[in-house]
Structure formats: C-alpha cells, structure tokens
Image (cartoon, helix red, strand yellow):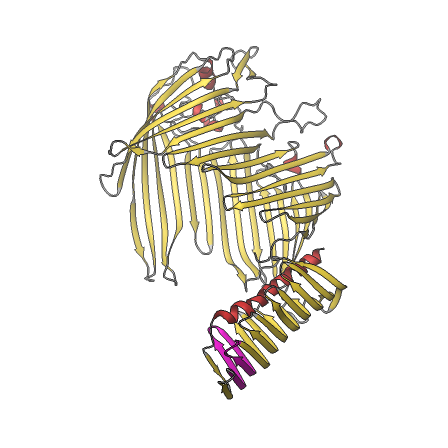
Amino acid sequence: MRLLKVIHRALVFSLLVFNLFTQDAIAAGKVVHWGSANTKVIRQTHMVELRGDSYLIRNDEDIRADEIDYNQETQFVKARGRVRYQYGSFYVKADAIDVDLEKKTGVIYNGNLTNGTFALRGSKMEQLAKDRFLVSDYDYTTCKDCPNAWSMTGKQADLTIDGYAFIKDFVFKLKEAPMVWAPWMVIPIKTRRQSGLLFPRFGVNEVHGVYIVAPMYLAVNDWWDSTFGLGYYSTRGARMEWEGRYALTSRSLGVANVYFTHDTAIPTLSNRYAMKVALTQELPFNFEAKFKLNEVSDSGYPIIYSEDIMGRYEPVLTSDLFISRNDPNVSTVFSLRRFRNLLFFDNAANPNPIAGFDNRTVQEFPRIVINTNDQFLFGSKIAAGLETRLNRFTRSSEVGPFDSFPDPVIPTNTDLVIREANRLTVIPNLYTTLNPWPWLSLVPSVQYRGFIYNFDNAANYPNLARGYLLAQADMSFQLEKVVPTDNPDVSFKHTIRPQLTYSAIPMTQESREHSFISQISRQGRPGQYFDYWDIVPLENSQDLDTYFTPLGHSLTYGVTTQIFKKEKQKNGETKISRRFDAKALQTWDILATGQTPLPGKPDNRIILSPLFAQLSYTDEKISSSIEYTYYSYLDQYIPNNAQILTYHSPHRLNTSFTWNIEKELRDGVMKFDRSFTVGYGFAKLISSYSSLTTDFHYSINDYVMPEVKYVFDLMSYPNKILEYRYGLLFQSPARCWSLDTAYTFSIDRGVGFIFSFALNLTGGTVGAMPK
C-alpha cells in the first residue's frame, strides 16, 4: 500500500506537469518569430513549413527541430527530428511532438520531459482530453545517477485526473533490478487528498523496546481528515494513535490527538492514555473561541510517553477555553482554566498511586474580562479606560473549601485556609502623555483597583470589599545616532532608552480583621491567595515563588540599548534588522528604605528587587543570548522560604550561542549544515541545576552530515551525561532518497536507535510533496 501511495503521488505530479505544457505553455501567446535553412509559407492553406535547423519562438517558448509545420488557422504545430522544446524551467527532448493549440491536446513521441529535478519518459505521451492521458512505456524517477537508484515503469497507463490510472505490466525498480511487478494495477489519481496507508514509524529504546506503528490516512471530506495508527511496543504492549484535523477557514481550524497504550509493564495501570486538542473557531456575532486540552490517564504518563504530550518537565498540565470578542469600544474575554497537578500521587493504599486526580487543585471556572478601549475625555489630552474582571475559584466538593495546616506559632493548633471564592475586580484609570521635548516622554497615570469577594457563606469568611489607589509617573527618553558605512546602501542606528517609573500607593481600603486579609498576609506558605490580584504590592515579597514588584513607594529604573542595521536590497526594498539588544531593570523599594528594624529583631528589609538583565546579538553567522538575574538581599528571603536550598547562590544565568559556519539547502534538495550550538544554564535557589548543552552539525560534503549532541549535568560530582545523540544523515548523490539514523541516550529513557528513510518523489526536498 505504501508503494501504491508513492506511485499515485508521482503519477499525479507528472500529469500535472505534462498538462502545464499542452494547456498553459503554448496557449500563452502567438508566434512572434520563426526561421530555418529553408522556409516556405503557403498562404492558401495557412501553413508554414520549416526545414533544416528549424525554430519557432513565441514569448518564453522555444521549439527547435529538424522540421516544423505550423498551421496558422488551426493553431496546430508538428515538430519532427531531434526535437527540443523549452518552456520556463521545463525541457522536452523527443523524436516528435504534436500540439493542438485550440483543443489543448498534444502528443510527445519517444520523449523525455524534465525540469532539472525529475525525469518522465515514454514512447508516447498523449493528452486525449483536458483530464485524460495515455502514456506508453511509462518511466518516472527523480534520481540523477545512472542507472537510476529507483524508478517506476509501466507498459501502458490510461489515466484520468480525479479518477484512476489503469496500468499494465507495472514494475518498481531499484537500480535496474525489478523489485515489485504486477500484470495489471489500478491506482487512484486524485489531485485532492486520498485515503491510504502511510509509511510506518519504527525504532527502539529502553523505555518502549522495539516499537512500530503503522498509520492509515483518511481523507473524510474537503475540510476534515484524520490519521489512525495501530502498533506494538515490545516492553509495553499494544498501541493505538488517532489524529484528527479540520480547517473550515484560515481562522477556523484545529487538531486533536488521542493516544492509548495497553501497558503490560504496570499491571495495575494497564490502560494508559493521553488526549490533546488545539483549535481556533469563529463564532457568530464576531466572537472567536480558542480551546486547548491536555489530559492524561495518570501523572506518570508524560514521563514515559513524552513524545505524546507535554509535561515531562512541567509541574502541571493546563487546559484552557477562551471566547473573545473585540469591538471598537469594548473587548470581552470569557475563559475556563483547568489544572492537572502532575506532582500529585495518591496515598500508598491506592493500588494505582499515580493515577489519581488532585481534587484539592483550585480551578478557575470561569474568568470574565471586559475592557473598554481608552478614550480621550471631553476633547482633552486625558485618556480614560475601565477594566472589569469576574473570577470564580473553585475545586471538587469532595474536599470542601478549606485546607488545613499546622499553626506556625502553635503547631498543635490547626490553621484553616480558604481555597474557594468569587471575586469581582473593577479598575478605572486615567493617564495623559506629555512631550516637553521630542526626545522626552512623561506619562502620569492613576488607577483604583477595587475588589469584592464572596466566599459562598464559608464560616468566618463574610463578604469582603477592598481596594487601593495606585499612582505612577513614567519618564523615558531616547538617544540615537545613525552610523554610515563605506557602503551607501548600508547604515546602522544605535538607540539608548533610559526609563524611570515612580509608583506610589497612597491609599488602601481593607479590613485587617477579616480572615482572608489575615490569610494572604502570610506569604511563606503556598495557597494563601488565589493570584497576584489579591496582593496589595506595597513592599517586596519575601517569597521567591511569589515575587512581585513593590509599588507602595518605589522607583523602577532601567535602560535599553539597541543597534539596527538598515540595508537596501537589490529589488529596491529596504530591510531593517535588529542586530544587538541589551536591557537591565531593577526596583528600589523606598518604603522599605525608610523603615527602622525593631530592636532585637532581624533586619528583613528587601530594599532592592532582583536585577534582571538580557542581552542578544544576531547577524548572518552568529546568534547569542544571555539572561541573568541577581537576587539582591537574598538572605532576607530565607527566613520566610524554607524551600531555598542550604547551599544557595544569588545568581541565575541562562545563555546560548550558535555559530552557523555554513547552512543552506543546496540545489533545493540537499541539506548542508555546518553549525555549532552551545548553551549553559545555572541556578541554585529553590531548585539547583548547572547544565551544559552542545550540538554540532558538520556536513562533510553534500551527501554526508554527522551530528553530535551532548547534555551535561555540571552540578553533580562527578559530572553526569544527561543526554547524547550521535546522528548521521546520508543523502544520495542521485538526490532521490535519504537515510537518517541516530543512536540516542537520555538519563530517563535509556539508549535508543532511530531510523528514517525518505524518497524524493518530485525532485524537491526529500520526502516532500507539493500542495
């Protein structure tokens, strides 16, 4: 069946190309020039007879032959003897060709049709009608070697576009050796998608053992298709996969995946599955919906089957539904959000300790946001806007609205924390923009953040109204300089943008005696509040997990510098690219600076926020980036955060560097890659890692490209190898097939072997088909 799929694609492609010649190529214009050693024009019969070194040229078409007969009245052309016909990138060599320009039919006798990427040969290639073809002694290949690495032949093929091909004496060859023969074969010839078997996926690793999955493609209709696969994992069991796709418009499309494995490695957890959905859908009345679903049978599934679904390195799986509408004056968003806790494991009495769902996890069902677009008031330069939010935080009724913890002061007592609530947020804001000089911008603003809470009549948690006033003043200016070069078409521009933002919260309205206000004031324990909107950000947070910028009385300062390259292209267009970008940002908590520690008490003030810095550089050969965070006053976080490591560091660093020595797609087919990538990450706060990643591709020539990749754990002693890959890509000099192999290892999946074989069916990129 896979071979039938290959034949079907190749035949469709060759027919479309042949159809291009006889319909579009010659009918494009009228003959503008002809010539030969002996030219005869017969006006009575409207014939032009060209004999000896004959040629006929019209637009970008060129026919050359020993003899050419052209009927000006019937638009019929006959060319005989060493015929050479060229149109654009396509080229025909034949003993003779006949073309009827009016009826759009034609015949190539004992010819070869090529465009430099494929070769179609036949003793007779005849277009009988617009959608019907008859090919004798059919031979098709994309190979450039001789003899061809592979080819498909047939004694005769009667083909109808969007119908069937009836092939007699069919043979599939490797080199000159026949591999598959059939006296008679019928193959669907569909320009649209066609159902059929796909090439199987197979390999081996320590997690799944030897595995193979055979997929089948189903073209359901014009807007919906799917792929269904059955397979077997030798160390796991039977496997089933399904993927469905639909596309109604460019804004109404989606994809869904379902995976199922009868996992015999865990007898008490044998039926394991994963589902993921991602779609965007237009709705009536200018609404748009976006839906994302990620669900698994158990918390361990993303680790064992990481190729199916995300979650191998994440603590939760998130599913979202967003319904939005944007109007000229108002934008509306309705959303549902569901979290699956992947760190949750049921108690030991449960025979399936990783299969349970954590009913204690708080879900956001729903969130509704309505924003007005900012408008100028009464023709002034003062703009106003309004944002409203409605959130419902809930969880399973089985566990109730409260979590209980030991009291931090009296451990024998129980401290209750509310985990369910309804919250209405209303935020009106005013701002204006002042430009005293062209290079200076001042933006003063003020907003009131008001909140109303309802706790569903929970004991000791009455309804609550609270809020605070936030005033800010933002000042920024830009310095820039244009630097010319010796090339008048190339110049650089360097910009520097310092920025200062002063923030103050002059007024806070809330009841300090309310149980929820007392609850959220204790930030050292998770689950004290629902999200950041519950916090009045007066001072720095002393919990690294819940860091926020202090706004009570603070000054945020930063600077951004960038370098742009402006280059005039050969086509006259101007290209502007960013070469260099660097920024740094930090906040000074003035409120904490003015406080005096109590006598005999530790000084827990955090005067400076963490310093954030980023740097990136990109050009034609090199790309690099650095992200750095320095945690000022780190010791002040420790008494309120037991999760900080004993041997900690205030530095967090992530950096990467790529050098593309030479990287291109040669002749539109051959992948050529000589590049080196190195990345490093370091952190030693709540979690610790120090990892180095290297990836090296080096094409020896156009045909052989090895790859070596390593990931090292530099935190352990001695250092460990977390992952490596030895890959080798071989691309046939015939440019019609490739073989990609790799030997892999990862610390959680063991060793494995990957094997991938691809045929070049159309002369383009290996394994690809035109749309």
Total tally of numbered discs in the picture:
0
Quarter assignment of residue 150 = bottom right
Q: Is residue 246 above or below residue 687?
A: below
Q: Position of residue 548 (x, y in %)?
A: 43, 28
Give the residue displayed 61% in from the left and 34% down from the top: 295
378 left or right, relative to 661 = left
Quarter assignment of residue 121 = bottom right
Towards the viewer: 3 or 27 = 27
Give the residue displayed 35% in from the left and 20% down from the top: 595
Towards the viewer: 602 or 214 = 214
Q: Position of residue 543 (x, y in %)?
A: 47, 25
**Any magenta on residue 71?**
yes
Q: Is residue 25 above or below residue 489?
A: below
Q: Is residue 665 above or below residue 34?
A: above
Q: Does the image show residue 731?
A: no
Q: Position of residue 573 (x, y in %)?
A: 37, 59
**Any magenta on residue 409?**
no
Q: Is residue 677 above or below residue 336?
A: below
Residue lying at the far bottom in this picture: please name it: 38
Residue lying at the far left in this picture: please name it: 436
- Quarter holding the C terminus is bottom right
- Quarter holding the N terminus is bottom right
> Majority secondary structure of the magenta segment?
strand
615 left or right, relative to 405 = left
Which stretch is magenta? Answer: 47-75
Towards the viewer: 446 or 290 = 290
Quarter assignment of residue 485 = bottom left
Q: Position of residue 503 (x, y in %)?
A: 33, 28
Q: Does the image show residue 446?
A: yes
